[in-house]
Image (tube, helix red, strand yellow):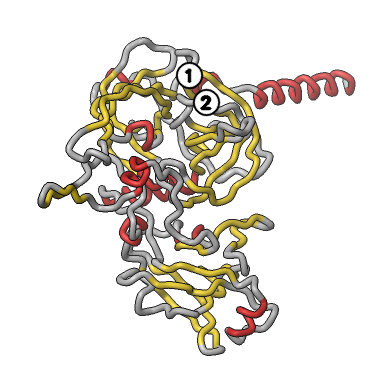
Amino acid sequence: MQRGSQILACALASLFITVSAFAREDIKDEIVKIYTVANVPDYWNPWGMRGTTGGTGSGAILKGKKILTNAHVVGNETFIQVRRSGEARRFPARVVAVAHEVDLALLAVEDPAFWDGTEGLELGDLPYAQDEVFVYGFPMGGDTLSVTRGVISRIEHQNYAHSSFNFLAGQIDAAINPGNSGGPVIRDGKIVGVVMQGIRQADNIGYMVPAPIVEQFFADLEDGRYDGFPSLGVVLQSMENRDLKRSAGMTPDMTGMRVYRIKPGSPGDGTLKTNDVILAIEGAPIADNGTVEFRPRERTSLSYYIQKKTIGDSLSLEVWRDHKRRPLSIKLTRPLNDDQLVPNEQYDILPSYYIVGGIVFSPLTRNLLQAWGQTGTTLRPTTLLQS
């Protein structure tokens, strides 16, 4: 009897390993391929367009009959169609919400036939390093659903290629190629991230928009309008230099980031002062390199706590000013885009221009710099941190 129990236990363990090691079949019914036609503005000749282009991407059906994908999949779109995995029919779709700074978009399909047999996926929690995940999508080279398996390599802030803003991101080692963009990263049957970009010069290094950023996007939309991620409106300087720390009257064991510049009209203007040292944010101590511990023994940029807020929320800080610790509360009233002297990449809008005396004037944007050939142009000192 004992031998039979051991055999049964081994069989059950083997079944569990088999089920967990492979992608679930029912999830495949919730994945879509997205077909787009886009008309991209020509910022070098702002009265014209660069021409119409077609592309494809991936997406996931959510509960509530919406499709989650990347903003860059549907940016500057003029026509969108979606097709469910395993089916041939395409359905017209439209964008209902987009957050270009975090490369996320929601699509809707009006035809009720599209939703037949769908249940929709739910969001999961932020995974940990070494967690196993599955990436679903439609990469180049085929028209059927692709499922690749990998692990989470790390969680930290990264520059999002679509917007040039710095947000929390998850690095994964699953194979990611053009066409995978917008596809879900799945763990335990739930979406823990959205594939957004890869590194061509590296082997199997890709990035996803993690679940907390997606949740924040959804929270912003609860009032029916997307306002954007908030900005504190300050430029910060590292306090790793001992002489700089000594000049501020700080003891060697104190850590923080010095307020180097405050942007006029920003939330920090009028409350923070130049040369203040921010010691803690939302109760989390700030290291001299500008990082905070967001989970035990895991660190990322202090912007993590700002980006967990929505426009109108208050942010609590502890600063070192005039050799004293001071608690401050700042209401976050402006989105990131409003605190950029030179706006980051813009989408879904036409460039403005003026002609005076035969000379064309156009506002300076990163789009214009890229059209001029200055891709990757750094518009601020790299040793400073904007928040």
Query: Which kind of residue does numbered mark 1 sit on?
Result: Met
Is 268 placed above or below 97 here?
below
Give the spatial CA distance, label 1 vs label 2. Answer: 7 Å
Q: In the displayed image of the protein, which residue is found farthest to the top?
A: 88
Q: Is residue 175 visible?
A: yes
Q: Nearer the viewer, residue 380 or 325?
A: 380
Write down the residue under mark 1. Answer: 140
Is 115 placed above or below 223 here?
above
Q: Quadrant of residue 78?
A: top left
Q: Quadrant of residue 272?
A: bottom left
Give x and y (percent) for residue 155.
Answer: 60, 47
Query: Which kind of residue does numbered mark 2 sit on?
Result: Asn
Write down the residue under mark 2. Answer: 177
Q: Judge the density around disc 2: few (<14), some (14-19), many (≥20) Cα neighbours within 10 Å.
A: some
Is 88 placed above or below 367 here?
above
Give x and y (percent) for residue 324.
Answer: 55, 88
Q: Which comes sooner in the sequence, label 1 or label 2?
A: 1
Q: Nearer the viewer, residue 188 or 178?
A: 178
Q: Nearer the viewer, residue 384 or 333?
A: 384
Q: Judge the density around disc 1: few (<14), some (14-19), many (≥20) Cα neighbours within 10 Å.
A: some
Q: Is residue 305 visible?
A: no
Instruction: Please give the name of the residue rendered at 55% of the width and 28% of the height, measured from the top-left corner.
Output: 176
Q: Do the CB atoms of the residues marked 1 and 2 lie less than 8 Å apart?
A: yes
